[in-house]
Amino acid sequence: MDLRDSIDKNNIPKHIAIIMDGNGRWAKQHGEDRIFGHHEGVNSVREIVEACGEVGVKYLTLYAFSTENWNRPKEEVDALMELLVSTISLEAQNLHKKGVRMQVIGDTASLPASCQKELQESIDLTANNTTVTLILALSYSSKWEITEAVKKIAAQVEKGELKINEITSRLLDENMNTKDFPDPELMIRTSGENRISNFLLWQLAYAEFYFTEVLWPDFRKQEFYKAIISYQNRERRFGKTSEQISNN
Ligand code: FPP
């Protein structure tokens, strides 16, 4: 049975964020090195982007490389950067044909120049697409993003351009890397780890979390649909009571 048929088309999350975890363990289970797992993970990325287009998810954020990932062994960091550059350059045309718009969040200035160049080219190429917005979180961490936002706001206060009582939650939204995207309604993490790992701490305030034991390279369309169905079976209360929600 295709789980896609069980999805309620009227209650599709607009934005899904994913912590793609378990590439290393998947590779180990298959007797391969960690890099092989990351390569296999790219096939899952391709399928999930396609699935978003098929069911109508408009924004997909993928945690592809965290600020903390810079601390991995040099050969793994180099291989991941190379994989990112080659994947983006190989997939850009294909994404473009499917109507995918590429965006990036994170401290991109810290990425190798070749990676920045490929990213910028695919962002420019796909800028007018509207089917799905694929947001890659690269050299990203939420504490970094929030700190940067606070610095920008503090600088405005220091210059006398902003009063302290004009600092609102919306102003913080507007100073985040994600200012052009709605907050995710659903956050998925694969590989059995039940942590948020410095990912979109501000933006996930009201998101539903879905944790699965499945390792990222095995997380394909049917697993993605399972997560959407689980989301659709939950009651989102935003601090209200169950009765208030059903009376609305
Ligand atoms: C986590 O698995 C995965 C990563 C740190 C990298 C994710 C990158 C990709 C899937 C490939 C590139 C993606 C794009 C968007 C082009 P892990 O290494 O932490 O696995 P482990 O916890 O089993 O060791």
Image (cartoon, grey):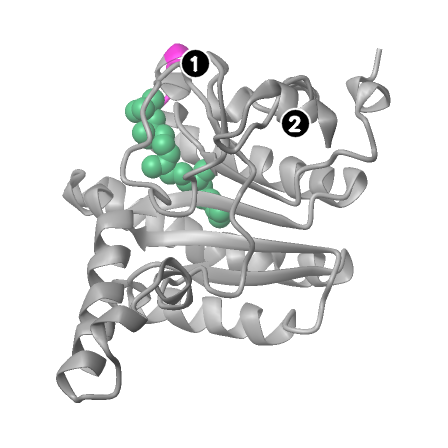
User: Please, what is the three-letter code of the amino acid marked with disc 2?
Assistant: Ile
The label shown at residue 30 is 1
Q: What segment carries the magenta color? A: 29-33
Looking at the rendered structure, the secondary structure element under dot 2 is helix
Quarter of the render that holds ligand 1: top left
- Where, by quadrant of the figure, is residue 52 drawn? top right
Q: Quadrant of the N terminus?
A: top right
Of the numbered discs 1 and 2, the one sitting upstream in the chain is: 1
Question: Compared to 9, does 121 lie above or below?
Answer: below
- Where, by quadrant of the figure, is residue 2 drawn? top right
Left or right: 1 with respect to 52? right
Residue 231 visible in the displayed image = no
Residue 176 visible in the displayed image = yes
Total count of labels:
2
- Coordinates of residue 216 in the picture (x, y in percent): 48, 25
Question: Compared to 31, does 10 lie above or below?
Answer: below
Residue at which label 2 appears: 245
- Where, by quadrant of the figure, is residue 226 drawn? top right
Q: Are marks 1 and 2 in contact (CB under 8 Å)?
A: no
Left or right: 16 with respect to 204? right
User: Please, what is the three-letter code of the amino acid marked with disc 1?
Assistant: His
Identify the residue at horizontal 66%, vertical 45% (top origin). Answer: 14
Identify the residue at horizontal 51%, vertical 25% (top origin). Answer: 217
- Coordinates of residue 235 in the picture (x, y in percent): 62, 21
Crowdedness of circle 1 by 10 Å Cα count: few (<14), some, many (20+)? few
Q: From mark 1 to mark 2, how far is it between C-alphas?
A: 47 Å
Crowdedness of circle 2 by 10 Å Cα count: few (<14), some, many (20+)? few
Looking at the rendered structure, the secondary structure element under dot 1 is loop
Front residue of this view, candidates 27 and 205 = 205
- Coordinates of residue 219 in the picture (x, y in percent): 57, 23
Front residue of this view, candidates 220 and 85 = 220
